[in-house]
Image (cartoon, helix red, strand yellow):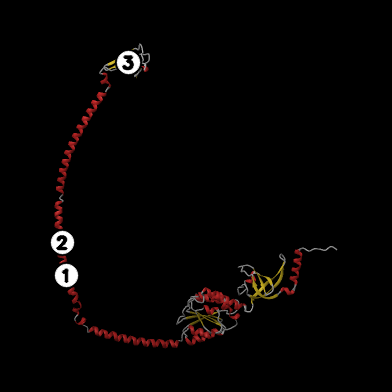
Amino acid sequence: MAQEYLTISALNKYIKRKFDVDPYLERVYLTGEISNFRMRPNNHQYFSLKDERSKINAIMFKGAFQKLKFAPKEGMKVLVVGRVALYEASGMYQIYIDHMEPDGVGALYQALAELREKLEKEGLFSQPKKALPRYPKRIAVITSPSGAVIRDIITTVKRRYPIAQLVLFPTLVQGDKAAGDIVKNIKKAETMDFDTMIIGRGGGSIEDLWPFNEEVVARAIAASPIPIISSVGHETDTTIADLVADMRAATPTAAAELAVPVLSEEILRIKEKQARLEQAFLHQLQRKKERFDRLQKSYIFRQPNRLYEAQSVQLDRLTQRLQQNMTVLVNQRERGLAQYHTRLAQANPISRVKQAQQQQTYLQERLQQQMQAYLEMQQRRVQQAITSLDLLSPLKTMGRGFTYTTQEDHVIRTVKDLKESDITIHFVDGNVKAAILEIDEVKE
């Protein structure tokens, strides 16, 4: 009988089917350490779970991972709930995690510690705290309208400082929607004219107090321009709201006591200050009166002319110095004026004009002399040029018996230029037509 061979895909599909229908693998509770974890923002998370001897691959889809209240880290021991299945493509089985929390510490405590660490690094806890007003007029109370918190606050404020106005903002202080409701009422109170804000609720478990550990609530408290008193839980409970608030109160009654003074004590303190102010005023008035009496008896009022005796002497001295300085200045100006008169007479323009006229007459005579000499010199040069030209004139040469010959309007310089035709012989006093009978050329 021939054996039938399976494909890898068929085998993996069969095994996957076994995993899927196994009721024990549909919901598995495991504990182990996280290994090979690398955060993939806004994506599915792939990592491993291991113990001392074994390891299993794990997948946590994006939706389940976003519900975690803590940040997984390498080596962290966790408790996980999920299902085990086979991945057909690789033939490897893995656990698909639906829920995960730290092992040994609750998820809320882990999330609280991580958020506290984050906000502390940002400086939200150490930022400057706003001072509470000493005499508040309007106080906003953000708490449940049915709890004992609001009753304790109202009772304490009425007893201590009844002139303050309390305004309750009914708020959810427990449950998933409580954080958003707290933030909404904080922002609503910020738009109104309040001096102080009290946020509080009674004691409870960490789950009950969790809205006051939410990051949105912490940031809303830190950003509020109104001073906030936090009174959440019992004295031993410390929430993030307590750390971020401007003042923390152990109980609602303590919060009310921090928010308002005792009116009767303040009135007594005002009366004491009023009495001290009256005594100080009377004492000051007495001192001023005594000083007035002393000044009234002073020589200044009895002999007021003594006030300006020194100034009068100083005025006389200054007047004398002014007269002396004026005399010296006038003498200096007179001497300077005489010098200017002398210099002006020396620089009289009439004499300068006469000198200029004499200079002009002299220069004109020299110019005429120079022009006459120049003309005579030029005449001699012209005469010399005429004589030179006359010596060089061909007519002058022809007058001594020289002639020149032309043939067909060309001057004949050598016998080679002659043709067998008539020639013209030019004399100083006329021309002669001649015929060539013979040409006798001289051989060199």
Q: Quadrant of residue 429?
A: top left
Query: Is disc 3 placed on a helix, strand or loop?
Result: strand
Circle number at residue 319: 1
Q: Residues within 10 Å of mark 2 (few under 14, many from 20)?
A: few
Q: Residues within 10 Å of mark 3 (few under 14, many from 20)?
A: some
Which quadrant, please, contains the C terminus?
A: top left
Q: Nearer the viewer, mark 1 or mark 3?
A: 3
Q: Farthest residue in the top direction?
A: 437
Residue 128 horizontal side relative to residue 431, left or right: right
Residue 338 horizontal side relative to residue 74, left or right: left
Circle number at residue 424: 3
* Mark found first going from the N terminus, 2 or 3: 2
Q: Between residue 190 and residue 244, name the one nearer to us.
A: 244
Query: Is disc 1 placed on a helix, strand or loop?
Result: helix
- For the point 48% across and 87% down, which residue is it? 160
Q: Residues within 10 Å of mark 1 (few under 14, many from 20)?
A: few
Please name the residue that numbered disc 2 is placed on: 332
Going by the numbered disc 1, the residue's amino acid type is Thr
Q: CA distance from mark 2 to mark 3?
A: 106 Å
Going by the numbered disc 3, the residue's amino acid type is Thr
Inspect this view and state whether residue 324 appears: yes
